[in-house]
Image: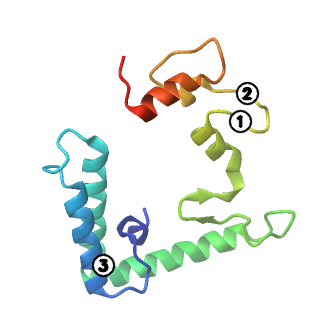
Amino acid sequence: MDYYNVLGVKAGETSEIIKASYRKLAKKYHPDANPGDEDAARCFKEAAEAYSVLGDPDKRTKYDEEQKKAAGKQAAAGKGKGATGSAFSGQSGAGFDYENVSAGFERFFGFDPQTGKVNNEKLNPKEKSKAEPIDVSGLFERYMGIKK
């Protein structure tokens, strides 16, 4: 987990900016402000974990060194990969995997662009299957907040 991304700050930011970003996230995702919201609780825990490391100068220095070592190993492992020689071969930025774009596409849009197959379970996991590959009425109802 990239603690800088969790807090929404750059790696070189001052401790004051990191603290302000943490406080903003903690207030936004605090369990008391979002009762019963598991995603908010998860975000709150991630922010607290990130701040516990980045808020302490010694832990932050150690974390930065580990990140640099990991980036060096990843870059060394990525050498020679990618037939095109693209600058993005073997790298991932902000949680995006450039090597496996179709899996991310399928995760967000519910179908594999290479095969054209629709994965109904990923598209709408609460409902088993539909007669049509894409049913926009369910999407419209969720968007408008209509409950049946």
Cα distance, mark 2 to mark 3? 44 Å
**Label 1 CA crowd tier, 10 Å (few <14, some 14–19, many 20+):** some
- Name the residue: 68% across, 27% down: 118
| Quadrant housing the N terminus | bottom left
Name the N-terminal-most of marks 1 and 2: 1
Look at the numbered disc 2 and give the secondary structure of its residue. Answer: loop
Residue at the limit of the structure toward the right, as seen here: 83
Name the N-terminal-most of marks 1 and 3: 3
Any mark on residue 117, and which?
2
- Where 130 sits versus 114, above or below? above
| Amino acid type, callout 3 | Ile
Any mark on residue 56, and which?
none
- Name the residue: 69% across, 50% down: 101
Q: Is residue 74 left or right of residue 17?
A: right
Cα distance, mark 1 to mark 3? 39 Å
- Name the residue: 38% across, 68% down: 3
Residue picked out by circle 3 = 18
- Name the residue: 42% across, 80% down: 64
Look at the numbered disc 1 and give the secondary structure of its residue. Answer: loop
Name the N-terminal-most of marks 2 and 3: 3
Any mark on residue 112, and which?
1
